[in-house]
Amino acid sequence: MIPGKYLLTLGLIFGSAVSTYFVTSSTAQQGTQPQPVRADNEYQVAAILYQQTAAEYRALCYQAFNWGKIVLDGDEKTKKRLPKIERKKPRAVVVDIDETVLDNSPAQAHLVKNRLPFDQKSWYAWGEMRKARAVPGAVDFLNYAVSKGVKVFYVSNRDDVQKQATMDNLKSVGFQDVSAENVVLRTTESSKEARRLAISQKYRIVILMGDNLDDLSNVFERKSILERFAETDKLRAMFGNKFIVLPNAMYGTWENAVYEYGRLNELQKGEKRASAMTLP
């Protein structure tokens, strides 16, 4: 027969061992939990401030949209030179949405202020708020186009699930021609070329407007910095005619080109940015 004192001692030892196991296991599990990613995006502060506080930014936007009116008016006079099949098509203006007609700098500022990387969840949440303001001059220009019988198409790489919130936001800031037909969001591929071609089957696209060269033509897609320069130089006559570009130093394909389209961590991105600068 085992004495009671001996059994008590064994029980204490066993209980201590089990307790130690669970504490150690719990601590180990906590240690393996993914920690929030701290993004190195302080470098974007100047770009955000420029968009939000610089009168020069507003002036560039007004300049772009004022020139758009001139292009539309000039096209009305010169379309007689076009082939008959093109003259018969109704006219269209194709615009990107983000940083072209809607200003998302508050969402970008939130990420920088909190050192957070871009992610779909927070981007969707911002879209659902329907709080983006119109880019200066955008409402006047697009409503002017509508008054001239020009169809406006909003071709964006917002995901199609954001369509209703996007339409609500566009309407709330004053854009008149907004419908499920002409708000054309991303469904499968990021390239906008197929969507532009589909529009051009029925309409004659007079102007393409965007803050990103990929908004204008697929010749710029996934090109290096030097290749983007070369393509821009080749198409120099298109800018200010069919192509009109809005300023956006916060983000864009230009930054992807700096990173050589790689999936880099924050340290690697910082190194790429530093090495891409031209020094004396």
Image (tube, rainbow, N blue to C red):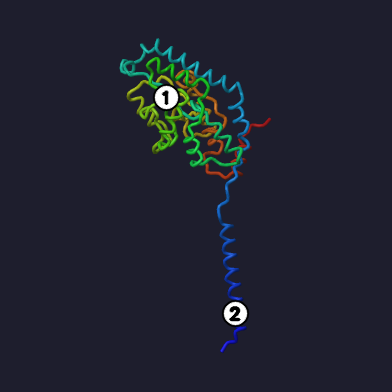
Q: Is residue 102 left or right of residue 275?
A: left
Instruction: Pick whichever, 207 or 82, lies toward us.
Output: 207
Which one is in front in this view, the residue at disc 2 or the one at disc 1? 2
Location of the C terminus (image quadrant): top right
Q: Which residue is mark 1?
A: 94
Of label 2 and label 1, which has the lower sequence position?
A: 2
Q: Residue at x 58, y 73 (%)?
A: 15
- Residue type indicated by callout 2: Leu
- Residue 172: image location, x then y, percent: 46, 26
- Residue 183: image location, x then y, percent: 40, 29
Establish if 128 lies above or below 246.
below
The residue positioned farthest toward the front in the image shown: 4
- Residue type indicated by callout 1: Val
Q: Residue at x 49, y 42 (%)?
A: 121
Tag 2–tag 1 contact (CB < 8 Å): no
Location of the N terminus (image quadrant): bottom right
Q: Quadrant of residue 91?
A: top left
Q: Which residue is mark 2?
A: 10
The residue positioned farthest toward the bottom in the image shown: 1
Mark number, residue 214:
none
- Residue 150: image location, x then y, percent: 38, 18
The residue positioned farthest toward the right in the image shown: 280
Q: Mark 2 falls on what kind of element? A: helix
- Residue 233: image location, x then y, percent: 51, 24
Q: CA distance from mark 2 to mark 1?
A: 80 Å
Q: Mark 1 falls on what kind of element? A: strand
Q: Residues within 10 Å of mark 1 (few under 14, many from 20)?
A: many
Q: Residue at x 57, y 38 (%)?
A: 111
Q: Is residue 207 left or right of residue 37?
A: left
Q: Residues within 10 Å of mark 2 (few under 14, many from 20)?
A: few
